[in-house]
Amino acid sequence: MIKDSIIKGKKILFICPRFFNYEKEIKKELEQQGAEIDYFDERFGNDFFNKSIIRLNLKFFKTFLSNKYYLNILKKIDDKNYDFIFFISPETVTEKILKKMKERNETSKFILYTWDSFLNKPSCKYLMKYFDKKYSFDKKDCKNTDIKFLPLFYLDKYNSKNENRNFEYDISFVGTAHEDRFFIINKLKENLKNQKLNSYFYLYLQSKKIYYFRKIFDKRFKNAEIENFYFNTLTHEEIVKISNNSKAILDIQRDIQSGLTMRTIEIALGMRKKIVTTNKEVKEYDFYNENNILIIDRKNPFIQKEFFDKEYEILDEEIYKKYSLKKWVENIFE
């Protein structure tokens, strides 16, 4: 007999930033496990202007816009009684709003999950006291705290089990061109070309304005040309198609981040495919296998052709189940 989910019949207020539709997939999984969900974007705006206010941490404008946005949400849910209030990686909600939420939802359990490190989103650290349960994908942020470590997950649509053997690319990458990703990929292109390895890189920028801004102010963009970037996001289905046509996938985490990216979990476990990563912390995880995972130096990236010669080695089935979205949700609400 299959045991009912702990959230079956529960009401959940789910607040999460829009991020490549992952918020939709999480909402869908919560609903599939029987919960009733009200979802709101964590950010008060996703256009260039509002994102600039958030990223530059212009406190007066950020606080004013955030309080206005969340007070409107509180009006919309004024007659609701939630079992859980679930935040993912908050960076705009203020302490004032969280206090109001707790006053109005005295019996609700407040849960927080962060998929960004505190070094990247330091404001999140000061909101911890308002949550009953806290989780982070970053082991370093969990040390000497009551924050539980919980890695990210893969979506079912990535569970393709690497059945394709006719690869168009030896290695590919699809992702936002943040920090030093362009610098690393630009260096790797020559390395791969010299070894006659086929590659595909889809470096995404939110707008051409951001390209010109970084071209002027970011020395790592010194050699960047506008044709090196794409300004439209790909769907999960399009990303899966590119990944299926690749023997291995490149992963470049933020330099200040030790937690594993979603890409690492999706590729190494969901798609059961080889991955090349700049994150040396992957060695500490139960699915690490040097045949499947190659760690490179982000300052001097180099990939040996021999890494592509051997097939991906299958792991214990329980490890794959452990990192699914279904299991991740169960762990959050256990």
Image: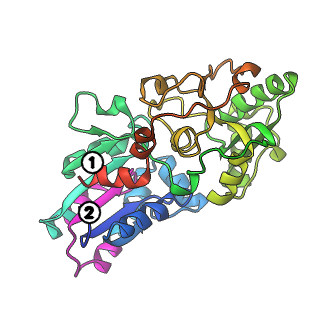
Disc 1: which residue: 127
Image coordinates of residue 77 in percent, x first then y, are: 28, 77
- Is 142 drawn above or below residue 31 in the view shown? above
Between disc 2 and disc 1, whose residue precedes? 2
User: What's the magenta region?
Assistant: 72-100
Residue located 73% across and 41% down the image: 246
Image coordinates of residue 326 in percent, x first then y, are: 39, 55
Q: Is residue 67 visible?
A: no
Locate the N terminus and report the quarter of the image it occupies.
bottom left
* Mark 2 secondary-structure assignment: loop
Mark 1 Cα-neighbour bin, 10 Å: few <14, some 14–19, many ≥20: some
User: Farthest residue in the front direction?
Assistant: 1
Residue located 69% across and 23% down the image: 307
* Mark 1 secondary-structure assignment: helix
Q: Quadrant of residue 312?
A: top right
Determine if the magenta segment contains residue 81: yes
Image coordinates of residue 247 in percent, x first then y, are: 72, 37
Residue type, mark 2 in image = Met
